[in-house]
Image (spheres, helix red, strand yellow):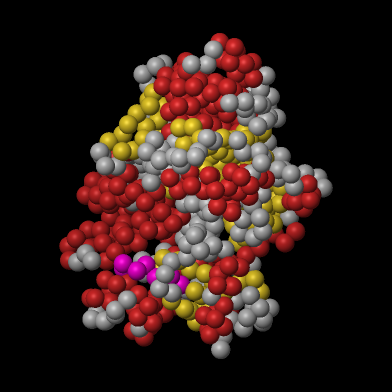
C-alpha cells in the first residue's frame, strides 16, 4: 500500500494544475474567502520541509503543533511527511500541564504555536521538556520575549527553507522516496476522560487504508463540493476528513475561530462538513424556536411541508425508492417556500453530505434534518481506528443506528456487548504503553473499543453506551447516562447535562441551562432575577425545567428517569477540568466538584 499522505500534495498539483484552489481561509471580518492554490500549497510544503531539515529534524522525530485551525497546520503536517517526521497535534485549549505532558511523552523536538497564549505556555514549559529545542510561532503579531533565543516565526521558517541549498532539498527528496507504509504518520492523543492521555500510533498505511475505503463508500461527493473545517484539526475526525477532502479535490474552507462558525458558514456555503451532534442540536433548537412562534396560515404551511418532507425523504429517498410524481412536485414547492429558507438560516444552501459523530444525536433531530433536506450521515469511530468504523450508507440507512461497517473494517460484538474492531485502519498501539496495548487488544488481535452495542435486523450497528460510563443504581439497575443526556440535549432551554446515580437509589442530574433562552423566558413571564444564581434557584424556573425534563423522558423506564436535578449558574468548561478537549464530560471531576450539590439531591 502506497504512502498516500507523503506524496498527496504533489500528486494533486499534477492533477489540478497551478491555478486550482486547494483550500481557503475564511475571513469573517472581510466576509470573504482567502484562497490557497495547489501550486502555493506545494511550494509552502517544500519550503517548510526543507527548513525542518535545516533545523536538524530527522526521520522519526516528533513535531508538536499547539494551535487552532489554520493553513499552517496543514502545511506543517505535509512538510513533516516529506521528512518522515511525525506531527503530534495538541488541542489549542490545552493547559500548560497537558502540553508539557504530551511534549515530554512524545519527545517532541520542535513545537509550532498559534497565538500569544500558546507562545506563553511553550516558553514556560521548554525548560522542563528536554527534547524540545525550538518554538515556531504562526501568528505574526505575537511579541517575543526579549531574552527569547529559542523561537522562530513561521514566515522566517518559510524563508529559511526557500534559501536552503540543493543538498538540503536532495536530503528531503531522498527521505520522501524512502518513506515506508509502516512509518508513523501521527500520534493522536486521547482526550483522557479517565487517566492520562495516550498517544494512538497511526501509520501511513492506516491513513492510506482509511482514505481508500472512504473513496469507496462516499460515492455521492466529488471535487465540485466544498467543505468547512471547523472542528479542531487535532481531533482525528476533522483531521481525517480534511485529508480525505484534499485527496478528493474538495475545496476546504478553514474556519480559524470556532465561535464564529455561524458567521463563517454563509461565507463558505459548504455542501459537506463534518460536525459533532452539539452543532446540530443547537441548530435544531433555534429552528424549532422559530417554528413555535408561527401561527395561522404560516403554521399550517410549515406543518404540511414537514409531513411532505418526511414522507418523501424518509419513506422513499432513504430507501432508494422512486418518489411518486405528485409527491416530488409538492416537495419541490415546499423546499422552495420553506426548507431552503430554514437551511439558509443555518448557513447551508448547497447540501450534499454532513457526517456527524462523537456522541449520540437524538433520532428525532436526525429525522427532522433529513426531512428538511439536510443529509446528516451518522457515523462512529475513534482515534484508535483512524476515525470511521461505520456510517450511514447512501441508501437504506437506519435512523437510530450509526450505520454499517466500512469496507475492509471488521466489527463484532464481544463479551459485555463490547464492540470489537479489526482491520487496516486500526492503530498500531499506544506510544510507549505496552501494558495498555495488552489490555486494549484481544489475544487474536481485535481492538476493544470500550463501547457497547449491537447489530439490528438490517445489519446496522447500534451504540448502546460507553462501557466505562455505565453505572448501576443501588437497586441493581444499569443506567446508560449518555442516552439520557442526549434526550435532554435537544431541548432549547438545556445546554449541558451530567446524569448522576452510580450506586445511588435513583437517577439525578446536574443541568446547565441555555442561559439566553432561559433569561428570555423569565422576562416574558415576569420572573425577576438579579443574576444567574437567582435565576436558577427560582421556583417557577425549576418547575418549568422540571416539566420539560418529564416530557423529554417519555418512553424511558421508571428507574432510568431523572428524579431530581440541580441547575447551575455557570457552564462546564475545559479550563475547570469538567470537559475534555473534545467537550466530553469528565464524570469523575463533576462528581468531585459538585459533591455537595449531588448529596443534597439524595438528602
Observer able to see residue 311: no
Image location of residue 236, percent across then percent down: 55, 43
Q: Is residue 311 above or below residue 201?
A: below
Q: Nearer the viewer, residue 230 or 409?
A: 230
In the rendered image, residue 512 lying in the magenta stretch gets the answer yes
**Residue at (61, 68) in percent of width and height:** 588
Q: Which residue is drawn at the image coordinates 43% and 76% (left, top)?
A: 567
Q: In the displayed structure, would residue 590 be above or below residue 179?
A: below
Q: Residue furthest bottom?
A: 603
- Foreground residue among 237 and 209: 237
Q: Residue at x 37, y 67 (%)?
A: 514
Depth check, front residue: 53 or 450: 53
Magenta-colored span: 511-517
Farthest-out residue, front: 147
Question: Which quadrant does the N terminus fall into?
Answer: top right
Image quadrant assignment for residue 3? top right
The C terminus lies in quadrant: bottom right
Q: Is residue 372 visible?
A: yes
Residue at image location 49% in from the left, 74% down from the top: 510
Q: Position of residue 114 (x, y in %)?
A: 45, 41
Image location (x, y in percent) of residue 499: 54, 71
**Residue positioned most to the right:** 443
Residue 163 inside the magenta-drawn segment:
no
Residue 264: x and y in percent read 32, 44
Q: Quadrant of residue 301?
A: bottom left
Q: Is residue 188 left or right of residue 140?
A: right
Please state if 478 lies on the left or on the right of 169 as rendered.
Answer: right
Amino acid at each position: 500500500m502506497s504512502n498516500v499522505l507523503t506524496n498527496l500534495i504533489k500528486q494533486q498539483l499534477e492533477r489540478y494544475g497551478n491555478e486550482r484552489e486547494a483550500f481557503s481561509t475564511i475571513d469573517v471580518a472581510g466576509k470573504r474567502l482567502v484562497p490557497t492554490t495547489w501550486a502555493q500549497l506545494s511550494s509552502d510544503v517544500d519550503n517548510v520541509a526543507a527548513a525542518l531539515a535545516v533545523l536538524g529534524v530527522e526521520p522519526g522525530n516528533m513535531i508538536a503543533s499547539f494551535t487552532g485551525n489554520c493553513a499552517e497546520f496543514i502545511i506543517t503536517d505535509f512538510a513533516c511527511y516529506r521528512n518522515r517526521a511525525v506531527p503530534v497535534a495538541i488541542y489549542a485549549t490545552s493547559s500548560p500541564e497537558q502540553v508539557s505532558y504530551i511534549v515530554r511523552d512524545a519527545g517532541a523536538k520542535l513545537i509550532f504555536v498559534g497565538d500569544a497564549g500558546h507562545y506563553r505556555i511553550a516558553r514556560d514549559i521548554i525548560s522542563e521538556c528536554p527534547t524540545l529545542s525550538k518554538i515556531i510561532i504562526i501568528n505574526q503579531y505575537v511579541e517575543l520575549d526579549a531574552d527569547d533565543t529559542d523561537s522562530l516565526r513561521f514566515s522566517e521558517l518559510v524563508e529559511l527553507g526557500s534559501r536552503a541549498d540543493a543538498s538540503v532539498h536532495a536530503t528531503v527528496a531522498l527521505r520522501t522516496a524512502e518513506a515506508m507504509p509502516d512509518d508513523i504518520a501521527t500520534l493522536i492523543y486521547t482526550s483522557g476522560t479517565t487517566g492520562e492521555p495516550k498517544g494512538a500510533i497511526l501509520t501511513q498505511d492506516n491513513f492510506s487504508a482509511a482514505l481508500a475505503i472512504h473513496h469507496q463508500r462516499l460515492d455521492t461527493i466529488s471535487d465540485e463540493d466544498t467543505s468547512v473545517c471547523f472542528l479542531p484539526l487535532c481531533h482525528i475526525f476533522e483531521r481525517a476528513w480534511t485529508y480525505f477532502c484534499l485527496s478528493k479535490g474538495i475545496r476546504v474552507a478553514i474556519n480559524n475561530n470556532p465561535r464564529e462558525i455561524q458567521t463563517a458558514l454563509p461565507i463558505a456555503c459548504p455542501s459537506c462538513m463534518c460536525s459533532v451532534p452539539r452543532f446540530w442540536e443547537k441548530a435544531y433548537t433555534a429552528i424549532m424556536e422559530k417554528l413555535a412562534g408561527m401561527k395561522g396560515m404560516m403554521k399550517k404551511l410549515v406543518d404540511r411541508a414537514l409531513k411532505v418532507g418526511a414522507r418523501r425523504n424518509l419513506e422513499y429517498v432513504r430507501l432508494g425508492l422512486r418518489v411518486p410524481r405528485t409527491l416530488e412536485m409538492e416537495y419541490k414547492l415546499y423546499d422552495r417556500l420553506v426548507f431552503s429558507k430554514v437551511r439558509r438560516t443555518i448557513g447551508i444552501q448547497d447540501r450534499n453530505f454532513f457526517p456527524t459523530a462523537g456522541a449520540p444525536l437524538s433520532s428525532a433531530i436526525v429525522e427532522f434534518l433529513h426531512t428538511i433536506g439536510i443529509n446528516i450521515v451518522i457515523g462512529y469511530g475513534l482515534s484508535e481506528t483512524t476515525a470511521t468504523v461505520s456510517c450511514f450508507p447512501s441508501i437504506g440507512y437506519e435512523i437510530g443506528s450509526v450505520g454499517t461497517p466500512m469496507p475492509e473494517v471488521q466489527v463484532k460484538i464481544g463479551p459485555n456487548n463490547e464492540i470489537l474492531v479489526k482491520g487496516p485502519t486500526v492503530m498500531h498501539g499506544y506510544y510507549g504503553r505496552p501494558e495498555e496495548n495488552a489490555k486494549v487488544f484481544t489475544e487474536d488481535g481485535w481492538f476493544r473499543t470500550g463501547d457497547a452495542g449491537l447489530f439490528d435486523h438490517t445489519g446496522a450497528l447500534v451504540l448502546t453506551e460507553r462501557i466505562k460510563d455505565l453505572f448501576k443504581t443501588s437497586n441493581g439497575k444499569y443506567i446508560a447516562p449518555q442516552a439520557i443526556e442526549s434526550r435532554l440535549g435537544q431541548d432549547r432551554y438545556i445546554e449541558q447535562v451530567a446524569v448522576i446515580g452510580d450506586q445511588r437509589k435513583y437517577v439525578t442530574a446536574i443541568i446547565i441551562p441555555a442561559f439566553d433562552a432561559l433569561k428570555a423566558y423569565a422576562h416574558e413571564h415576569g420572573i425577576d432575577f438579579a443574576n444567574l444564581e437567582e435565576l436558577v434557584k427560582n421556583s417557577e424556573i425549576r418547575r418549568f425545567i422540571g416539566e420539560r425534563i418529564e416530557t423529554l423522558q417519555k418512553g424511558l423506564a421508571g428507574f432510568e428517569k431523572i428524579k431530581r436535578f440541580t441547575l447551575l449558574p455557570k457552564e462546564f468548561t475545559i479550563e475547570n477540568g469538567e470537559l475534555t478537549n473534545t467537550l466530553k464530560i469528565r464524570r469523575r471531576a463533576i462528581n468531585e466538584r459538585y459533591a455537595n450539590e449531588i448529596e443534597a439531591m439524595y438528602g
